[in-house]
Amino acid sequence: MDNGNLFFKQDKIDPGISLDVAKENARTIVSSFNHISCDAFSPGKKDFAAGVDFLKELQSSSNFDYISCNIKGKDAQLLFEPYKIINIDSLKLGVIGASSPFDSEEVFIDDAYLSISNTLSEIRDECDYVILLFSASSADYKKISSSDLDFDLVVRGNTNRHSHDGGSGKFPIYSTGDRGKLLYQFDLKHATSLGPLIDIAYFEKAIRTDSKRLNQLSRDTLQDNTQKIEEYRNNIQKYNQIINSVDNSLQFKKVTLDKLIQDDPYVLKIVDAGKLKAQTMGSPMLDPNRFQNR
């Protein structure tokens, strides 16, 4: 899945690069995604840099679904389906797309929180788990993170932040950075329809933090830290019990897409063909190495 700002580097085409080359770069990204597979894509503001018509052209050549519950065209109708439901074995996974408002003469963006809340209410009972792909502003991120919405996972785009865990809120929120430099892998363990989805990374981080504090206190012989030491030991034991006893869990892994990742030969061919075509247009291709490791 991808949570937006996929096709262009900025919300306007970069100065010094022709519109034709920028579009060719976006088509190369679509071809790469068609090969590596993608279940759902939620557009962000930068994806509209070449206009709505071009984004719809990209959609028509994509074998993955574009979703957004609050981006509308000039006719006040949603440009894309608001969500997608994916059947995985016996599970139903709901995926909602959304974007914070941005300036545009071609689209209108409804209030993100209200649109997300209404769409969640529509599909919550139908799904075992619901994920939100959200190209979010800082304000909308804070509003969602402090809410009591019944999500199982929120994946936030439109940010330079890279999460190491999903936080301590009601549901985990992961910020995934930008420009396709990192792959966030989420492994879901499902054992029962009862009980919450536990974010393992959060408790693993808590164990590391309290273990570090415990080691520091244990070396301090000048003060009586018995009470604090016992507190940290109890916390570590409690967190380990949670990790080892949960029925439904979310395991997170962050993969850096660098030269250590083996290139996909077919994607390399796609990128090389796009570079050659861009060169005939008289301008270098944007980020030619971006998808070589996907």
Image: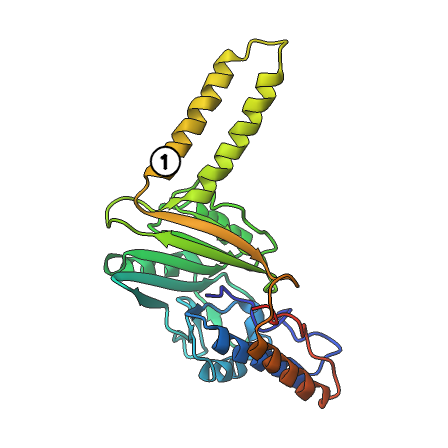
Kindly indicate the quadrant of the structure image that contains residue 23. bottom right
Binning the other alpha carbons within 10 Å of mark 1 as few (below 14), some (14 to 19) or many (20 upward) gives some
Front residue of this view, candidates 225 and 143: 225
Image quadrant containing the C terminus: bottom right
Could you tell me if residue 186 is visible in this image? yes
Q: Residue at x 42, y 43 (%)?
A: 200
Count of labels in the image: 1
Q: Residue at x 61, y 82 (%)?
A: 269
Residue 113 horizontal/vertical position (percent): 41, 56
Kindly indicate the quadrant of the structure image that contains residue 290. bottom right
Tell me the kind of residue under disc 1: Ile
Q: Residue at x 73, y 75 (%)?
A: 15
Above/below status of 278 relative to 109:
below
Front residue of this view, candidates 115 and 132: 132
Image quadrant containing the N terminus: bottom left
Name the residue carrying label 1.
242
